[in-house]
Image (tube, rainbow, N blue to C red):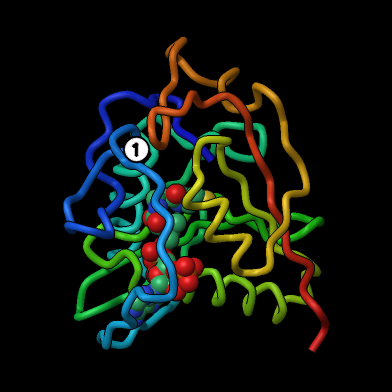
Amino acid sequence: MSSSSFGAKPAVLRCSRCGTFVDWAEARAQVVCECRPRLELPPVLVREAGDAERVAALELFRRDFGRSGIVAFGQIMDLDAAPAIVAEMNGEIAGALAYRLVDAGLHIVALATDPMWQRSGVGGYLVAEAELLARRLKIPRVIVSMTNDNLPSLYFYQRRGYFVSEWIPNGAAKHAVSASLVGFGGIPIRDEVRLEKALSPQ
Ligand SMILES: CC(C)(COP(=O)(O)OP(=O)(O)OC[C@H]1O[C@@H](n2cnc3c(N)ncnc32)[C@H](O)[C@@H]1OP(=O)(O)O)[C@@H](O)C(=O)NCCC(=O)NCCS
């Protein structure tokens, strides 16, 4: 998943050491061990987005992925039209997931957690809710699209049972308006990467 206007993005990730919010290019990967404390946090409530919540969800997506449409699954997606699931913490919209249903599966088109609430379980609950929805609709798999630079997201999904199903060289860069695209950690954005998870029948 990537934006066709990669420049001029506000902060989208939160530093796990000092808490500062950072933009993609300023963020760095860091190895930590199990010493990381488990925090007691308010409950995460997830639900299908109503009209007012869709506005908050779109704002989150636009901040993370740019304002002129998200490139995912080989095309520029119109998020205004996509159904969304939102997560609420402490009475505010803390994260959102946009999806679409296709024959092959449920496509996660966008996922974003407000930096304030990152590493609080929001992303995990949203993905679990999307999987639950797919199961209810008897859809066999969930598929997500991201760009090659997005190491936090590659890590996040593989930790949750997803595996890389397609790596499409130049799949993201060919849709971009700018020639030099810089993503997480300053890594050039070029490829689209798809990960999927087969859902076992319950
Ligand atoms: C990727 C992204 C959605 C993850 O969202 P998130 O809300 O931080 O995800 P979670 O909180 O569920 O999980 C993140 C980590 O926090 C940990 N965590 C969750 N609750 C916790 C708690 N109470 N105390 C301590 N750690 C906690 C999780 O265990 C997980 O770490 P692990 O995988 O090493 O075990 C978020 O980083 C983001 O918005 N990124 C920018 C946009 C993006 O890349 N979107 C995805 C493109 S498809």
Q: Determine crowd level at label 1: few under 14, some 14-19, many 20+ residues with C-alpha closer than 10 A.
A: many
Quadrant housing residue 38: bottom left
Quadrant housing residue 142: bottom right
Residue 81 x/y as whole percent: 49, 49
Residue 53 x/y as whole percent: 31, 65
In terms of secondary structure, where does tag 1 sit?
A: helix
Tell which quarter ligand 1 is in: bottom left
Task: Inspect this view and state whether residue 148 appears.
Answer: yes
Residue 176 x/y as whole percent: 50, 19
Measuring 76% from the left and 41% from the top, which residue is drawn there?
166
In front here: 161 or 97? 161
Measuring 36% from the left and 83% from the top, which residue is drawn there?
45
Answer above or below: position of 196 versus 133.
Answer: above
In this rendering, would 117 be left or right of 18?
right
Answer above or below: position of 58 versus 192.
Answer: below
In this rendering, would 172 be left or right of 38?
right
Answer above or below: position of 49 versus 61.
Answer: below
Q: How many marks?
A: 1
Q: Is mark 1 within 8 Å of ligand 1?
A: no
Measuring 35% from the left and 64% from the top, which residue is drawn there?
95
Task: Inspect this view and state whether residue 49 appears.
Answer: no
Quadrant housing residue 120: bottom left
Quadrant for the N terminus in the image: top right
Q: Which residue is mark 1?
A: 24
Measuring 43% from the left and 78% from the top, which residue is drawn there?
47
* Farthest-out residue, top: 179
User: At label 1, which amino acid type do we have?
Assistant: Trp
Quadrant for the C terminus in the image: bottom right
